[in-house]
Every structure is written in C-alpha cells, then in structure tokens.
Image (spheres, grey):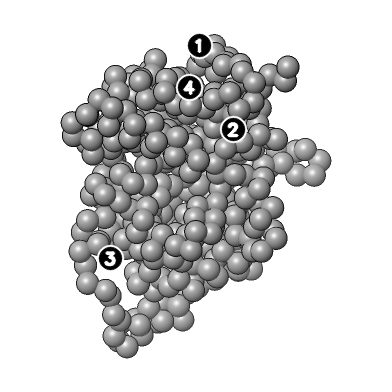
C-alpha cells in the first residue's frame, strides 16, 4: 500500500502548545509534533483541520503548514468545516468567532517538490508575535542572509524581517491607515510640482570628487533629496529595474503557479495572479487593508542608499546600514530623504542618522556607518 505521510499533504503543527507565547525559539527538531499516516485521499487534511479548529475554539493558536496545497484550498477546508460546525451547534456570534479563529491561525504553504524539514525550520526559526494597528495580531518573521561571491567568499550579511498578517482582518478592522484613507485625493498644483522639480535639479552627486573625513563635521546635514510624486508608473518602473519576485506572464506565469500552488491569488476575473499587484492594482491593495497602491519596500531601502552614496562619493565605503520601514508610501505622495552626521571615529569612520519623511512624518528611520578617505 502506498502510504502518503501528512507532511506531503497538510502537515499541521499545533502551536497551540505556545498559546499566547511567541513561536518556539528552540530548534524545530526539539519541538513535539507528530505525523498522520494514511493512504492518499483518505482525508488527512480534513482530520487535521478538525484538530486545528478544536484547538482554535479552545482559544489556542495554530500554525498550519500546507505542503502541495494552495492557501486558498486550505482556507476552504477551514471555511467549510467551520460553517458545518456553526450550523450543527447553532453557534452564537458566528462572525466574531470566525474573526478570532482567522486572527489566531497562521497558514504557511510549501511546494511539495522543494519542501524539507530544514526549510521549515528556517522559516519558523524566529517568529515574534506583535499586536498591530494595521492587522491586529501579526507575526514578525526574521531571517539571516549571507551574500557570497563566485569563490564562496563572504561579502555581506543582512538580517531581514517581514510581518505576516491576516488580510481580512487588516481590511475590515485595521486602524493604522484610517487617517490616510480619510484624506481626499491629492491633486498637485504647478507650483507644488515645480518645488519637487527644483530639488531634482539641485541634487548633488559627489561621484569621483572625494569627500574627505577631515572635511566632515558632526551635526552636518545631508542635502535634502526628493522622490516622487509617487505614481503607479513609478512603482512599475522600479519593478522593471529590480526584476520583481513573482511578475510573470503567460506560460512563465503558469509554470510559476504550478510549482508554487499557494502563490497565485485570484483576481476579479478568477485568474491566479501575483501578490505583487498590490503595487499597481488599487482594488487588490484595498483588499489587503491598504489605502491604495503603494511603493516597494526594497525601493525605500534604495532611496536611503542613493542618498548616502550621493553624499559620500565613489571613494567612500558603506560599512553598515540599518533601518525600519514603518509604512509604505502611496500613489500621490511625495517623500524626502534626509540625514545628519552623528559621530566621527577613527580611520575615516563616520556614523550618520538617515530618515525618509512623508508630509513631515518619519516613515523610514535609519542609521549608517561609512568609511571616507582620509587626506594624508
């Protein structure tokens, strides 16, 4: 008999054991979890979802790891079984209970062909729970990335993180962008546009002219640099240069969603489309709780480095950069990159404070350390 393990259909990690605590900080191999083994088609997913619903209705929290099954299909199991339970037991306050279940459940999807316990452990390595204004409960996922050259030599290291949120909760109950959503559409006057264009014209690119360590003073401001006004065309232009993660068309898109079944999110035509369309499709952006189409996160990072390298010149070296992206910038908004020298050290070291402003609000605070040439 060909026995298919649950990990090939829908492995469920009952993080109910962690209840109100963050996900386990110890290695996955030391955490208790079990396999369900049954012939293919015997109903493993249905059994596991019932386990999960039982735990969720008891006030626990669940991480559901679905392998070889799309996010939408997994959510359908929950919806069907929940509605059946609600009807059978005449559950009161169905809407509130449904929202609470969605907030306490995290579904992670993997392609069956590329799944491994090590990959799962990597994704579960650092999960930190937060309560947010955007989507209520959110899980911060932290991961470490090393960059090496063709010889295997380490060039750089980076700690990155993202927040996993419930789209429905963000759209229906999130309050972070209530003020932004209440604003009337922005329309620029010719004078306002001229002010932005003057900053473009005055932008200084240090280039081959060295900025020497001796010529820098503590408290010195960096020139103001403008980006915007934000447009959907601008967001797409960035994706063209960056390459995008999931932007594919025709057969290439089919191959992608076939390999990664949870990736394609159906649009209004019922066609699986990439999640990146929040950056150019107003309808989808609002469906995930945002006020409208918005910029790319890595684009905000590139603005900081652009501002910094403009100032330090070609002979400078960026030793470190740290920043927090606290909110996106939406179509119609204009931002300014600013900075200030905070400290001077030995051997050409200069520490700086960097930030991005949007209508006076600091949306990306950051710090950097550069090494400047020292005049002999």
Mark seen at residue 47? 4
Say which of marks 4 and 2 sits in front.
Answer: 4
Q: Earlier in the sequence, mark 4 or mark 3?
A: 4
Instruction: Say which label, 4 or 2, has the lower sequence index.
Output: 4
Instruction: Check residue 228 in the rendering and tell me which mark sits there, or answer none.
Output: none
Q: CA distance from mark 4 to mark 1?
A: 19 Å
- State which mark lies toward you, 4 or 3: 4
User: Which quadrant of the figure contains the C terminus?
Assistant: bottom right
User: Mark 4 to mark 2: distance in Å?
Assistant: 15 Å
Q: Is residue 240 positioned above or below 136 on the image?
A: below
Which mark is on residue 359? Answer: 3
Report the quarter where the N terminus lies: top right
Q: Is residue 93 above or below residue 325?
A: above
In-front residue for pair 262/31:
262
**Residue located beneath label 2 in the image:** 67
Q: CA distance from mark 1 to mark 2?
A: 19 Å
Cα separation between marks 3 and 1: 49 Å
Marks 4 and 3, how far apart at CA: 52 Å
């Amino acid at each position: 008999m060909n026995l298919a393990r649950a990990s090939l259909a829908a492995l469920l990690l009952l993080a109910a054991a962690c209840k109100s605590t963050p996900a386990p900080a110890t290695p996955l191999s030391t955490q208790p979890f079990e396999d369900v083994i049954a012939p293919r088609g015997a109903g493993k997913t249905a059994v596991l979802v019932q386990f999960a619903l039982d735990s969720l209705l008891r006030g626990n929290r669940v991480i559901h790891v679905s392998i070889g099954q799309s996010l939408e299909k997994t959510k359908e199991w929950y919806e069907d079984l929940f509605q059946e339970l609600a009807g059978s037991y005449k559950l009161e306050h169905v809407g509130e209970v449904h929202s609470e279940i969605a907030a306490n459940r995290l579904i992670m999807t993997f392609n069956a062909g590329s799944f491994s316990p090590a990959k799962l452990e990597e994704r579960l390595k650092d999960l930190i729970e937060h309560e947010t204004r955007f989507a209520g409960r959110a899980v911060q996922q932290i991961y470490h990335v090393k960059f090496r050259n063709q010889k295997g030599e380490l060039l750089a290291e980076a700690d990155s993180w993202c927040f996993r949120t419930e789209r429905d909760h963000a759209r229906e109950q999130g309050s972070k962008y209530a003020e932004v959503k209440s604003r009337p559409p922005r329309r620029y006057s010719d004078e306002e546009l001229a002010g932005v264009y003057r900053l473009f014209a005055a932008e200084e690119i240090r280039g081959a002219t060295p900025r020497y360590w001796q010529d820098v003073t503590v408290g010195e401001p960096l020139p103001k640099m403008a980006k915007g006004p934000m447009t959907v065309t601008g967001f797409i232009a960035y994706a063209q240069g960056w390459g995008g993660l999931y932007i594919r068309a025709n057969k290439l898109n089919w191959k992608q969603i076939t390999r990664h079944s949870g990736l394609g999110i159906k649009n209004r035509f019922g066609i699986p489309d990439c999640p990146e369309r929040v950056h150019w499709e107003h309808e989808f952006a609002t469906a995930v709780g945002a006020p409208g189409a918005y910029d790319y996160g890595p684009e905000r990072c590139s603005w900081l480095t652009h501002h910094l390298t403009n100032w330090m010149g070609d002979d400078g070296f960026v030793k470190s950069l740290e920043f927090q992206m606290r909110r996106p910038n939406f179509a119609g908004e204009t931002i300014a990159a600013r900075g200030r020298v905070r400290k001077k050290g030995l051997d050409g070291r200069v520490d700086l404070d960097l930030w991005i402003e949007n209508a006076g609000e600091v949306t990306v605070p950051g710090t950097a350390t550069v090494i400047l040439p020292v005049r002999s």
